[in-house]
Image (cartoon, helix red, strand yellow):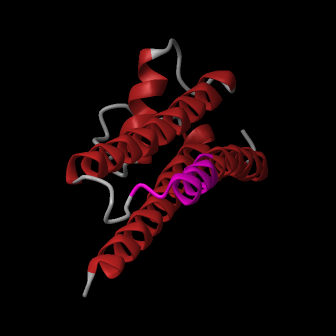
């Protein structure tokens, strides 16, 4: 597969994943602003459940992106079946990269784009969580 096609294809997959992740985070922000779950009137239990729910939604967003990446590898014929693309996408997206499943040279750049996607999306998640906790902890200071 041509290098330029791999870059374009990988960039398209990255863009789809970014849009999915940003839409989910935007929905979370809208919900948090509308329902203000972290006021002093809310119980600690309520706040804890809210934080757990947020983490589950963010985990779900990353899971969707891993499946998008896996499907993209399967669609271009880089990996057969469903288990190998999901496994490869998971270890690449999280940048673990065990190396027990590798792509043929004609697909390596497209595969590396999955790693770039994971790095960027975990960065967005980290920024969101840090911003949220900064706001929560900042509001509770006397």
Tell me if residue 67 is in the magenta stretch: no
Seen in the picture, residue 74 relative to 109 is either above or below; the reply is above
Tell me if residue 33 is in the magenta stretch: yes
Seen in the picture, residue 31 relative to 102 is either above or below; the reply is below
Identity of the residue drawn at 51% across and 63% down: 124
The percent position of residue 81, horizontal first and vertical second, equals 51, 12
Identity of the residue drawn at 63% across and 45% down: 17
Is 22 left or right of 103, judged from the image as shown?
A: right
Q: Judge by depth and name the residue closer to the eye, 54 or 83.
A: 54
* Magenta region: 24-37
Name of the residue lying farthest toward the top: 81
Is 77 left or right of 88, judged from the image as shown?
A: right
Our reading of the magenta stretch's main secondary structure is helix
Which corner quadrant holds the N terminus? top right
Is 72 left or right of 44, judged from the image as shown?
A: right
The percent position of residue 42, horizontal first and vertical second, equals 32, 55
Identity of the residue drawn at 43% across and 21% down: 84
The percent position of residue 15, horizontal first and vertical second, equals 71, 51
Seen in the picture, residue 53 relative to 119 is either above or below; the reply is above
Count the marks: how many? Answer: 0
Identity of the residue drawn at 77% across and 53% down: 4
The percent position of residue 93, horizontal first and vertical second, equals 44, 46
Q: Judge by depth and name the residue closer to the eye, 70 or 39.
A: 39
Name of the residue lying farthest toward the bottom: 142
Which corner quadrant holds the C terminus? bottom left
Seen in the picture, residue 126 relative to 44 is either above or below; the reply is below
Q: Judge by depth and name the residue closer to the eye, 137 or 45.
A: 45
Name of the residue lying farthest toward the front: 41
């Amino acid at each position: 597969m041509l290098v330029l096609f791999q870059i374009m294809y990988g960039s398209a997959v990255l863009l789809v994943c970014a849009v999915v992740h940003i839409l989910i985070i935007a929905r979370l922000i809208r919900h948090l602003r509308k329902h203000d779950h972290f006021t002093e009137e809310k119980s600690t239990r309520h706040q804890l459940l809210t934080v757990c729910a947020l983490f589950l939604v963010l985990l779900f967003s990353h899971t969707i992106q891993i499946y998008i990446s896996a499907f993209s590898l399967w669609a271009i014929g880089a990996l057969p079946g469903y288990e190998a693309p999901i496994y490869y996408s998971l270890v690449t997206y999280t940048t673990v990269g065990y190396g027990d499943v590798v792509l043929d040279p004609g697909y390596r750049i497209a595969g590396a784009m999955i790693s770039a996607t994971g790095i960027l999306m975990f960065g967005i998640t980290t920024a969101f969580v840090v911003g949220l906790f900064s706001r929560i902890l900042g509001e509770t200071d006397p």
